[in-house]
Image (cartoon, helix red, strand yellow):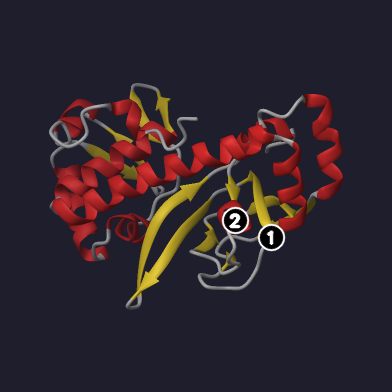
Amino acid sequence: MITNLSNIAIFSGIPENDLSQILPLLKERKFKKNHVLMFENDQSEDVYLIRSGMVKIYRIHEGKEIILSIAMPGDILGEVEALSNGNHRISSIEALDNVTVWLMTKQDFLQIVDSYPSVLKKAYMILVERTRMLNRLIRYLTFYDVRTKAANLIMDLYYNFGKPNSDIDKIDLKITHSLLAGMLGVTRESISKTLNDFQTEGLIDIREKHLYLLDKNKLEALCSETEEIPSLRKWNNF
């Protein structure tokens, strides 16, 4: 769990002594798995700082869920709406597991922005990273077949959640076929078939909703023409 405000990316440039003045502005909230923290087009202005757990950020189009990203401890949510003139949420956010957040009002967040220019700079950097991720998502959804999409997404997840497990690389995130399908804009049946193919080919294994990369090099070779710089797979490069 994040216990220090300096570990929240957007506040990392604030002097340590000043962070103690921000703590009284925060309210801790806990949400159960599958709880929706905010709905797209809702009128609300609070800003969320993730302390523990993960959430998915998504939109609904014609009854179909498209997952835009996954937010982790240290991330901020709702700052774009707070910094803009509008107060309608631009996406929905749902807890992937039990989540603890710090909550602050738009007014308090804007006061911090006015007092510490580094916060606005960090907000800009975060927005740039999210735009880069969305550009890659558009490329996935538009140009690749399901097999290439799935291979790229697995490598994305590996570079963000990968942990060595003996001699096998493990993605330390519980993954469902529905989650992967939502992140790729394909049907659950399509992603299930592709994952089964990858298992048959000895590329991956799936145990208790965790992905294990049995042959990372071959899997990455499927992406060699589409993602030539592995470091760009990191979702937070600021």
Q: Is residue 105 visible?
A: no
Q: Amino acid at mark 2?
A: Gly
Q: Position of residue 47 (x, y in %)?
A: 67, 55
Q: Is residue 186 left or right of residue 133?
A: left
Q: Position of residue 41 (x, y in %)?
A: 52, 73
Q: Amino acid at mark 1?
A: Asp
Q: Crowding near pointer 2: few (<14 within 10 Å), some, many (20+)?
A: many
Task: Reply above or below: 142 against 214.
Answer: below
Q: Is tag 2's residue or tag 1's residue first in the polypeptide sequence?
A: 1
Q: Position of residue 10 (x, y in %)?
A: 62, 37
Q: Which mark is residue 46?
A: 1
The reply to whether discs 2 and 1 touch (Cβ–Cβ < 8 Å) is yes
Q: Is residue 162 visible?
A: yes
Q: Nearer the viewer, residue 81 or 235?
A: 81
Given the current orientation, which residue lies at the most extreme top position?
167
Q: Nearer the viewer, residue 106 or 47?
A: 106
Task: Reply above or below: 41 against 142.
Answer: below
Q: Residue at x 58, y 35 (%)?
A: 121
Q: Crowding near pointer 1: few (<14 within 10 Å), some, many (20+)?
A: some
Q: Is residue 83 left or right of residue 236?
A: right
Q: Residue at x 40, y 33 (%)?
A: 234
Q: Position of residue 92 (x, y in %)?
A: 50, 65
Label 2's element? loop
Which residue corresponds to mark 2? 78
Q: Residue at x 54, y 70 (%)?
A: 39
Distance CA(mark 2)–CA(mark 1)? 7 Å
The quadrant of the picture occupied by the N terminus is: top right
